Image (cartoon, rainbow, N blue to C red):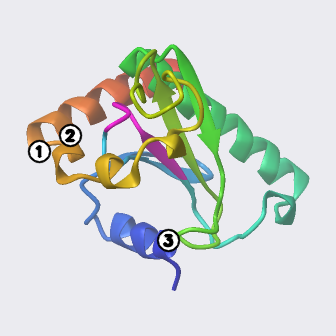
Amino acid sequence: MCGICERIKETKAGNNPFLVKELETGYVVIGDFQHFKGYTLFLYKDHVVELFDLDEKTRAKHLYEMTLVAEAVKNAFGAEKMNYECLGNGEGGAHIHWHLFPRRAGDIDNYGNNGRGPVWCYPSEKMYSDNNRPSNEELEDMKAALLRELDKLLM
């Protein structure tokens, strides 16, 4: 089973503390690490590898929901720009899932890019440092803020 499928299994069992909301095509979850405050994932519900493997109607719905999640992240966490990534060839596994990074000026300063470029320009040992894990209180506050913004957009 892939890493995303494992997370979805935990989510369905009620054991994912990072879950914000279930949508029709996927699960909205706060990222485990928060160097980019508000980093969120949108996990497609079923084990599908490529967007083109989805039928046209399902793909359109999934992409629509993903953009709603991105807008909610922007609104909840004050992003100046959103970065969207659907990679599927890392540790998470080959399973459609989106990395939604809220970006702000200077969020990767001092790493050779003057605060510009993809999040992967930031050293991974710093991005995934335990210092970037939200406390339980921070996590609950982040989830509540994101849920409020999602609910506004879904009305």
Q: Nearer the viewer, mark 2 or mark 3?
A: 3
Percent x, y of residue 126: 30, 47
Residue linked to disc 2: 139
Dominant secondary structure, magenta: loop
Numbered mark located on residue 91 in the image: 3
Kind of residue indicated by mark 2: Leu
Q: How far apart in space, not on screen, are marks 2 and 3 (Cα)?
A: 23 Å
Q: How far apart in space, not on screen, are marks 1 and 2 (Cα)?
A: 5 Å
Magenta highlight range: 35-42
Q: Is residue 60 magenta?
A: no
User: Is 78 on the left-hand or right-hand side of 126?
Assistant: right
Crowd around label 2: few <14 · some 14–19 · many ≥20 (10 Å): some
User: Is 55 on the left-hand or right-hand side of 37?
Assistant: right
User: Is 63 on the left-hand or right-hand side of 14?
Assistant: right
Kind of residue indicated by mark 3: Glu
Secondary structure at badge 3 equals loop
At 24% from the left and 55% from the top, the residue drawn is 17
Numbered mark located on residue 66 in the image: none
> From the viewer's perspective, is residue 137 above or below residue 31?
above
Q: Are marks 1 and 2 in contact (CB under 8 Å)?
A: yes
Secondary structure at badge 1 equals helix
Kind of residue indicated by mark 1: Asn
Q: Nearer the viewer, mark 1 or mark 3?
A: 3
Q: Earlier in the sequence, mark 2 or mark 3?
A: 3
At 20% from the left and 30% from the top, the residue drawn is 141
Residue linked to disc 1: 136
Percent x, y of residue 129: 24, 52
